[in-house]
Image (tube, grey):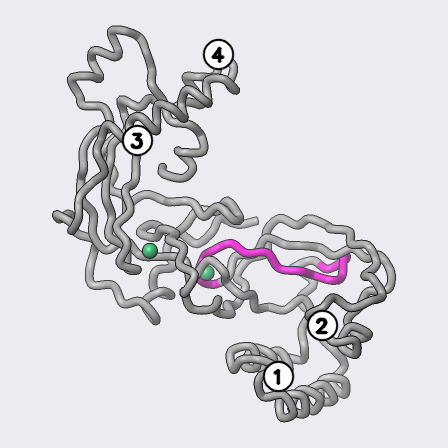
Amino acid sequence: MGAPPTNSRHLLLEDRPLKGAPTLQRLRGKARPRTEVLRECEAEAAEMRESIPRVLWDFLIPDLTRVFRWRVQLDCGCIPEILTREDDTPPHEMQWKEHVHDSQLTRGQMICWHDESPPPPYRLINEWGERREVAFPADPVAPPEYIDPEAWAVIRHDEPHTSAFWKVTPACGHVEEAVASSLDWTPASGPHLAPPHRVKQMSAEFDEIWHANPELQTERHRNHTRRMLADGWPSPQPEQLCYSYPQVRMILAYERVGWLVPRRRKAANAARNATPALSRSTLKRRL
Ligand SMILES: [Zn+2]
Ligand SMILES: [Zn+2]
């Protein structure tokens, strides 16, 4: 498994032109009251101390007196507040996490979820990473409500089966999961191709289906199917939908808000040897 590409920003440029590097500036609106944020962090830290043995506090519970607050303007228009350890690295120079696959985003990117985001695009898979096997029981005989009985008869697995799920890195650098139905398959063996006469037959069948049901698949999915047919119907497919991509935003500008705990209080706290801290969940979300 190789490291994810460190800079895939050029791939985002096709849809999202960036106007230079993010700038430090005053952003519209204002930061939340500091005491309110601090109270939340302290409450989470207290909760965390209950579940973590004291001997590990220093390692797992960050020191709130070292936490710095920022606001960032994203290309979706949102201005979230974020927290970092110390204030020497601006938010767009850090690598933020995507939590579905627990992967690192490219510097300058953050996830900001919008339901009305565009659908996920197909991307060529650059890397095949870790693999896990998942066993499925046989499908029930009766079709689920949303599938018509004829289609169900074709796609239904009448026996238990196992598929391999691979962590893959599409060309845009995000992490997704792809399915390989053959358990023996490895990236080195290359995709398995369908016999040419079968591909020809499938092309004709798809044309027929699309002609009869113009609404069945969007143009995006059809184009994907056409590419797969043109490539000899490879399995596993070399393309993967990137679900992260529509939710990934670029940081356009940022603002320094200040220390979560004013610096003079830091000294006082140190003297009292009391270490307020952030919970892991808060950190995961914010750091
Ligand atoms: Zn947003
Ligand atoms: Zn992506």
Along the line of sight, the residue nearer the viewer: 122 or 235: 122
Which image quadrant is residue 221 in?
bottom right
Q: Position of residue 244 (x, y in %)?
A: 46, 57
- Indicate whether residue 216 is drawn in magenta: no
The label on residue 55 is 4
Which residue position is annotated with label 1? 230
In the displayed structure, 240 sits above or below 208; it is above
Residue at 61 percent across and 82 percent down: it is 216
Circle 3 residue? 85
Ranked by sequence position, the earlier of labels 2 and 3 is: 3
Judge by depth and name the residue closer to the eye, 248 or 14. 248
Residue under label 2, please give it: 147
Q: Answer with mark 2 or mark 1, whichever residue precedes in sequence.
A: 2
The amino acid sitting under disc 2 is Ile
Q: Is residue 161 above or below residue 99?
A: below
Marks 3 and 4, the one that precedes in the sequence: 4
**Is 70 on the left-hand or right-hand side of 228?**
left
Q: Earlier in the sequence, mark 1 or mark 4?
A: 4
Q: Is residue 184 magenta?
A: yes
Label 2 to label 3: alpha-carbon separation: 50 Å
Q: CA separation, marks 1 and 3?
A: 50 Å
- Which residue does the image show at 51% across and 54% down from the upper left? 175
- What's the residue type where badge 1 is placed? Ala
Q: Residue 75 falls in which quadrant of the image?
A: bottom left
Residue 117 placed where, x, y %? 41, 65
> Dot 2, crowdedness within 10 Å: few (<14), some or many (≥20)?
few
Which residue shows up at 69% across the image and 58% down it? 186
Q: Which residues are magenta?
A: 171-185
Q: Which quarter of the rendering shows the C terminus?
A: top left
For numbered disc 1, what is the local secondary structure?
Answer: helix
For mark 3, give the secondary structure: strand
